Amino acid sequence: MKIKYILILPLFAFNLSAWAQECNSDFNCGIGYKCVKPPMSGYGTCMKTVNEYGTQQYNMPKTESVMPNMNMEGDCTFDTDCPIGFRCDRKYKVCIKR
């Protein structure tokens, strides 16, 4: 079973309920949040980065986040691709904390 929790950092997932601000890069979101974009999109939603246990992670914004998300595969396809307590968001193709 392939498990990834974030587009760039493989040990993280997201908490969608934390912040629902539109963005075009991590710099629009702030420390501890990431701009998560659907595949083939230049715009997304700010989401809190958390580890597989739901603990918030405070990562600095990434400069490559200004580019569109060209990853068509995403980090997950089904809920079973995510850790317990998370679900796979089919639009963003990332694991979201329930």
Image: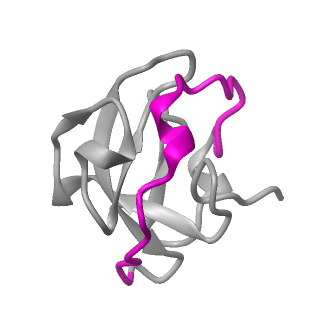
Q: Write the residue at 49% across / 63% down.
A: 13
Q: Write the residue at 83% across / 58% down.
A: 1
Colouring rule applied to residues: one colour
Q: Write the residue at 81% across / 56% down.
A: 2
The mark total stands at 0
Question: In this view of the protein, which residue sits in the foreground, 91 or 61?
Answer: 61
Residue closest to the far front:
63
Is residue 88 depicted above or below 85 in this figure? above
Is residue 65 depicted above or below 9 in this figure? above
Determine the image quadrant of residue 75: top right
Is residue 90 depicted above or below 48 in this figure? above
Tell whether 16 sits left or right of 72.
left
Residue closest to the far right:
1
Q: Position of residue 41 (x, y in %)?
A: 47, 17
Q: Position of residue 43 (x, y in %)?
A: 35, 23
* 73 in magenta: yes
Tell whether 75 sits left or right of 14.
right
Q: Position of residue 23 (x, y in %)?
A: 27, 33
Tell whether 48 sits left or right of 86.
left
Q: Position of residue 81 (x, y in %)?
A: 67, 54
* 33 in magenta: no
The quarter of the picture where the C terminus appears is: bottom left
Question: In this view of the protein, which residue sits in the foreground, 97 or 40?
Answer: 40
> In terms of secondary structure, what is the magenta stretch mainly?
loop
Determine the image quadrant of residue 44: top left
Q: Write the residue at 16% across / 40% down.
A: 21
In the image, which residues are magenta?
55-77
